[in-house]
């Protein structure tokens, strides 16, 4: 047994190309496109997964028109033509629309007149059938009206209410 601990082992890789110490040379294996072997400047070869590089951003040449502006420019005549066609259609339909509005107002007036006239007609028919006339000149019976009066009193907020009802 030696008196001191053994010295640590340091591995020094042997460079494949002694003249290319500063250059990094990628060497892709044939079967795996996402795995790349790279020789580092100190001569070691490292194999690992590589990230796919982002595609370069293509700068738009100056003076070109963006796509949204082209789309808007193509849609503007279409929208304008649609509005114009709608206006022309309304101008042709205006007499019919006016006639329809008059017909709707006439129907509403007829409905209101019916709601008012039907009860009056029923009342008149009932009086004719029963012979009950309210005019005294016609020789029939005179209809009298009943008057009801109420007198209600209460004491306090929650007091009991007392009242009288008089029929006249």
Image (spheres, rainbow, N blue to C red):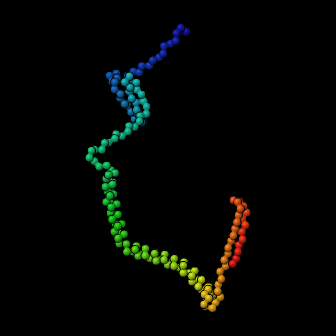
From the viewer's perspective, is residue 83 above or below residue 45?
below
Q: Position of residue 29 (x, y in %)?
A: 40, 33
Q: Quadrant of the C terminus?
A: bottom right
Quarter of the figure with residue 62: top left
Q: Is residue 150 visible?
A: yes
Work out whether residue 101 or residue 18 is closer to the camera in this orientation and state it. Answer: 101
Q: Position of residue 165 (x, y in %)?
A: 71, 72
From the viewer's perspective, is residue 25 above or below residue 143?
above
Residue, far top: 3
Work out whether residue 58 or residue 104 is closer to the camera in this orientation and state it. Answer: 104
Residue appearing at x 34%, y 26% in the figure: 23
From the viewer's perspective, is residue 137 above or below residue 146?
below
Residue appearing at x 34%, y 23% in the figure: 21
Residue appearing at x 70%, y 64% in the figure: 154
Quarter of the figure with residue 1: top right
Q: Position of residue 84 (x, y in %)?
A: 33, 65
Q: Is residue 130 visible?
A: no
Horizontal arrangement in the rendering, residue 150 relative to residue 31 (left or right): right
Work out whether residue 154 or residue 143 is closer to the camera in this orientation and state it. Answer: 154
Residue appearing at x 72%, y 69% in the figure: 163
Q: Position of residue 83 (x, y in %)?
A: 35, 63
């Amino acid at each position: 047994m030696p008196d001191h601990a053994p010295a640590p082992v340091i591995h020094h890789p042997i460079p494949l190309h002694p003249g290319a110490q500063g250059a990094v040379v990628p060497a892709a294996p044939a079967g795996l496109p996402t795995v790349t072997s790279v020789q580092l400047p100190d001569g070691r070869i490292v194999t690992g997964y590589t990230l796919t590089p982002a595609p370069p951003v293509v700068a738009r040449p100056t003076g070109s028109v963006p796509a949204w502006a082209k789309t808007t420019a193509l849609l503007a005549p279409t929208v304008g033509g649609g509005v114009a066609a709608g206006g022309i259609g309304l101008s042709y339909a205006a007499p019919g629309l006016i006639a329809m509005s008059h017909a709707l107002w006439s129907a509403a007036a007829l409905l209101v007149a019916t709601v008012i006239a039907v009860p009056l007609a029923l009342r008149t028919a009932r009086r004719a059938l029963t012979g009950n006339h309210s005019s005294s000149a016609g020789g029939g019976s005179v209809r009298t009206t009943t008057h009801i009066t109420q007198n209600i009193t209460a004491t306090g907020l929650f007091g009991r209410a007392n009242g009288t009802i008089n029929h006249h």
